[in-house]
Amino acid sequence: MPVIIFTEHSEDIIKKSSLEAISYGVALAAKLNTEAISLVVGQTKMNLALLGEYGVKKVIHADDLNINVSDNQCMATIITHAAEKFNADTIIFSNTISAKGIAPRLSVKMRAGMVSGAVSLPDLTNGFVVKKNVFSGKAFADINILSNKKIITLNSNAFEISKPGGEATVEKFEIGNITSSIKVTAVHKIEGEIPLAEADKVVSAGRGMKGPENWGMIEELAKLLGAATACSRPVSDSDWRPHHEHVGQTGLSIAPNLYIAVGISGAIQHLAGVNRSKTIVVINKDPEAPFFKSADYGIVGDAFDVVPKIIAAVKAL
Ligand SMILES: Cc1cc2nc3c(=O)[nH]c(=O)nc-3n(C[C@H](O)[C@H](O)[C@H](O)COP(=O)(O)OP(=O)(O)OC[C@H]3O[C@@H](n4cnc5c(N)ncnc54)[C@H](O)[C@@H]3O)c2cc1C
């Protein structure tokens, strides 16, 4: 029974987190001695056969004009149909905002056991045991999925992308009329910004910046590095920055390759949303700031001295 990997794309680019999910699905399919299929939904100009480079032999593409990719109910229905048609019993997602909306709905439709936020391949020696982060990344839990049908959402940065090479066959997947109890009437994209959830690098700042008028240097550093901007909760609560930049337990959970935290104390609720970042750089004038305990690199200093120097150094490079 094949493994289907729900493969997300945006502006004709496959999301990096989906390439991780494909690599994970391909490795899982090899373990289960079965085939990995990538499911792509929505219109795109990409040559989907190239997904074969990541190890899938087959791509199924549902691109009917009436599909609304922002409608989670509609997406769950499409994936259910695909699972039925291709006799798949395991569905892999990357743990994105879309997956958080679609996967639980799919779990109900397919009557599938689901683990969200997996961090490694299932252990098949005694069942189907999936390891996941719990308690905001402070512990791991091993969860045995007992149902025949299984859904896993994979944390970003938890599994390396592999590129064994090859070309996939691309099959159109006609889904006909899909009914949904909601209708998405408009989607307004924020233009010109790197989406925080997908960003490879993030420059984030907290109350140490003193006020919204001082964010110019944070934005400048982010722009130079090709990074997204983020902030701590009190900053967005005070309307210094928009709410979609708030990271942490009650905000967005992110896992970029580089997270630069400027004037953020490193409270546990903040760390909960950023401690999966690969490299953490902390800039804080207080050497006792808790964030230094989680940092790969720390600079003890005043942000108003340090950040302009970093900007100058990056410009010089
Ligand atoms: C239920 C609950 C949920 C929460 N969820 C979240 C969440 O999702 N995200 C979140 O961020 N918080 C969350 N919080 C709040 C959290 O507990 C902290 O209060 C918050 O993270 C602190 O923000 P901060 O570090 O920006 O500010 P502060 O705690 O005020 O820290 C400011 C830091 O800046 C440093 N600093 C000051 N001036 C300078 C300077 N000139 N140069 C360099 N450093 C300087 C200080 O030394 C200090 O370490 C939550 C709290 C609760 C109770």
Image: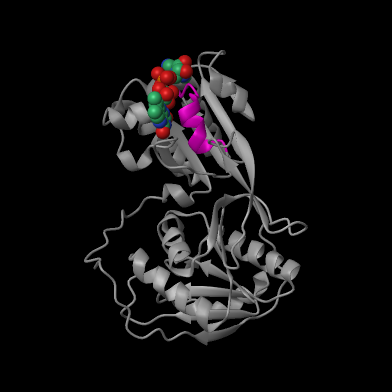
Camera-nearest residue between 21 and 167? 21
- Could you say which quadrant of the image residue 292 lies in? top right
In magenta, the rendered stretch is 263-275
Q: Is residue 155 visible?
A: no
* Rendered location of residue 91, percent (x, y): 56, 67
On screen, residue 281 versus residue 61, left or right, reads right
For this orientation, the residue located farthest to the right is 125
Q: Is residue 281 above or below residue 242?
A: above
In reply to whether residue 203 is colored magenta, the answer given is: no
On screen, residue 103 versus residue 278, left or right, reads left
* Rendered location of residue 36, percent (x, y): 64, 74
- Could you say which quadrant of the image residue 154 lies in? bottom right
Q: Is residue 207 above or below residue 194?
A: above
* Rendered location of residue 242, percent (x, y): 30, 39
For this orientation, the residue located farthest to the front is 146
Image quadrant in which the N terminus is located: bottom right
Q: Is residue 214 visible?
A: yes
Camera-nearest residue between 82 and 199? 82
Q: Is residue 67 above or below residue 195?
A: below
* Rendered location of residue 2, percent (x, y): 63, 76
Residue at 27% x, 27% y is 238
Image quadrant in which the C terminus is located: top right
Q: Quadrant of ligand 1?
A: top left
- Could you say which quadrant of the image residue 169 lies in? bottom right
